[in-house]
Amino acid sequence: MEAVVAYVDNELTPAAAGRADAHLSVCPRCSDEVANQARARSMLRAGNDVTAPASLLGQLCQIPTQEIDMRRAGRFNRRGR
């Protein structure tokens, strides 16, 4: 998926973009993924500001704090699990 996003966002090197173009010319599945990503990108860029309920924003703001607190309490191993 990351490669599809990089392709749609024109973030690939010219060589990688050329390889992707060649692949997309013969792979309908990947071509569909690129088309879907391009549509999503366009819709996001054309849309209005996204809003979320205050309760969700509050929960999202707590995520980094919770992870740090859990690490301090020894609830995570070195890989963060």
Image (cartoon, helix red, strand yellow):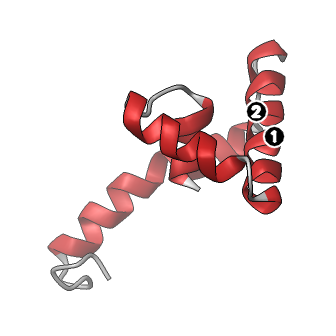
Residue at figure coordinates x 73%, y 47% from the top left: 25
Is residue 26 found left or right of 65 in the rendered image?
A: right
Q: State the residue in front, 48 or 51.
A: 48
Mark 2 closeness class: few <14, some 14–19, many ≥20 residues within 10 Å = some
Name the residue tied to disc 2. 38
Q: Position of residue 42 (x, y in %)?
A: 79, 22
Give the answer, above or below, for where 48 lies relative to 33. above
Q: Position of residue 54 (x, y in %)?
A: 70, 37
Residue occupying the point 72% across, 56% down: 30
In the rendered view, tell whether residue 45 sits above or below residue 64. above
Q: Give percent across and percent down for residue 27.
A: 75, 59
Question: Residue, x 74% and y 17% (percent of image)?
Answer: 45
Q: Please, what secondary structure does the residue beneath circle 2 have?
A: helix
Residue tagged by mark 1?
35
Q: How many circles with numbers are drawn on the protein? A: 2
Left or right of 78? Residue 12 is right
Q: Which residue type does callout 1 highlight? A: Ala
On the question of residue 48 being in view, the answer is: no
Q: Is residue 32 above or below residue 50?
A: below
Of the pair 62 and 2, the residue shown nearer to us: 2
- Which quadrant holds the N terminus? bottom right
The span from disc 2 to disc 1 (Cα, nearest Å) is 5 Å
Would you call the spot at circle 1 few (<14 residues within 10 Å), some (14-19), or many (20 or more)? Answer: some
In what quadrant of the picture does the C terminus appear?
bottom left
Relative height, residue 73 to residue 65 (above, below):
below
Q: Are marks 2 and 1 in contact (CB under 8 Å)?
A: yes
Q: Secondary structure at mark 1?
A: helix
Left or right position of 70 against 53: left
Based on the displayed image, in which of its 4 quarters is residue 36 positioned?
top right
Give the quarter of the image for residue 48.
top right
